[in-house]
């Protein structure tokens, strides 16, 4: 199994280069939406596509991934809301363990059930410590997971959770305020967490403008994920990419 995607993430982190991923929810797009998004993403130099959602009730996952693969060379990473969200056409999969909650099913239970399918998929598997942060509104992910999010103002809890995830062997830490969050994760929390782990840090949820994306990167985020805001206004892709890629490289 190749580790090309993970190596690209760690290499970009080592070089201080910030990355931008556009999140596509197969339940919320059609072919024409996808073609527009892909064209804008290619032009803007987007680094990755994340595909998935909390529900994915349509059968559009495979087709969605295939449309991306046919029309551009941007790597596709699956962001599964459940074990059934696997597509062999993608490049890699975030194997998410919800380390911020206390729901055993999402820590390990579903992984045991899905392991044979995931193993046989041939995808690059990236073990990811998934942390849901309170974004000021009930989100699909907190409802589906039946787990309380981490308090937005408790940086120390987030730090200790991320450190524990890394020491348990997680290769990525993903902090998410959830789809449609009223407020994004604070720069102070990002800075604290980034300062205590060595694996790449992914930040998503509630990022609605390029300024916030830029500030998150300055605070220590390695990969910014934007979905909802782009669903509402696809032209944001260019501005977001420009802001994220303009963060000065630390020498």
Image (cartoon, rainbow, N blue to C red):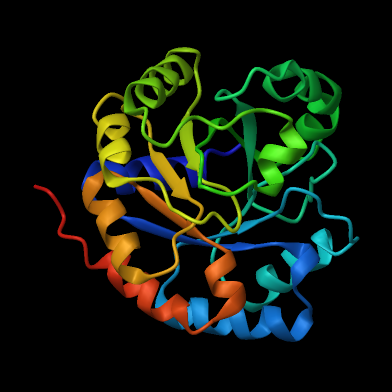
Picture coordinates of residue 102, whole percent (x, y)? 65, 17
Of the pair 216 and 61, the residue shown nearer to us? 216
| Residue at the image position 77 percent from the left and 30 percent from the top | 119
Picture coordinates of residue 121, whole percent (x, y)? 79, 40
Choose top left, top right, bottom left or bottom right for residue 201.
top left
Of the pair 182 and 208, the residue shown nearer to us? 182
Picture coordinates of residue 18, whole percent (x, y)? 31, 55
**59 relative to 111 in the view: left or right:** right
Above/below status of 216 relative to 163: below
**142 relative to 136 in the view: left or right:** right
Picture coordinates of residue 222, whole percent (x, y)? 34, 47
Asked if residue 198 shows in the view, the reply is yes
Of the pair 38 and 140, the residue shown nearer to us? 140
Question: For the N terminus, which image quadrant?
Answer: top right
Of the pair 137 and 165, the residue shown nearer to us? 137
Above/below status of 146 relative to 108: below
Asked if residue 17 shows in the view, the reply is no
Total of numbered circles in the picture? 0
Choose top left, top right, bottom left or bottom right for residue 194.
top left
| Residue at the image position 80 percent from the left and 50 percent from the top | 55
């Amino acid at each position: 199994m190749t580790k090309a995607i993970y190596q690209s993430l760690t290499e970009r982190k080592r070089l201080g280069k910030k990355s931008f991923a556009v999140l596509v929810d197969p339940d919320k797009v059609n072919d024409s939406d996808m073609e527009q998004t892909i064209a804008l993403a290619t032009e803007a130099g987007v680094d990755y596509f994340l595909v998935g959602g909390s529900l994915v009730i349509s059968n559009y996952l495979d087709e969605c991934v295939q449309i991306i693969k046919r029309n551009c060379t941007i790597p596709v990473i699956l962001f599964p809301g459940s074990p059934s969200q696997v597509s062999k056409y993608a490049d890699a999969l975030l194997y998410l363990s919800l380390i911020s909650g206390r729901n055993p099913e999402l820590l390990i239970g579903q992984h045991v059930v899905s392991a044979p399918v995931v193993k046989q998929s041939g995808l690059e598997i990236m073990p990811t410590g998934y942390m849901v942060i309170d974004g000021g509104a009930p989100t699909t992910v907190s409802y589906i997971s039946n787990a309380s999010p981490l308090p937005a103002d408790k940086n120390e809890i987030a730090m200790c959770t991320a450190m524990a995830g890394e020491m348990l062997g997680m290769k990525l830490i993903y902090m998410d305020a959830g789809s449609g969050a009223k407020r994004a994760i604070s720069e102070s929390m990002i800075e604290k967490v980034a300062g205590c782990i060595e694996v790449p840090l992914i930040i998503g949820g509630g990022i609605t403008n390029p300024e916030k994306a830029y500030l998150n990167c300055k605070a220590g985020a390695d990969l910014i994920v934007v979905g909802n805001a782009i669903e509402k206004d696809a032209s944001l892709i260019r501005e977001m990419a420009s802001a994220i890629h303009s963060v000065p490289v630390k020498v």
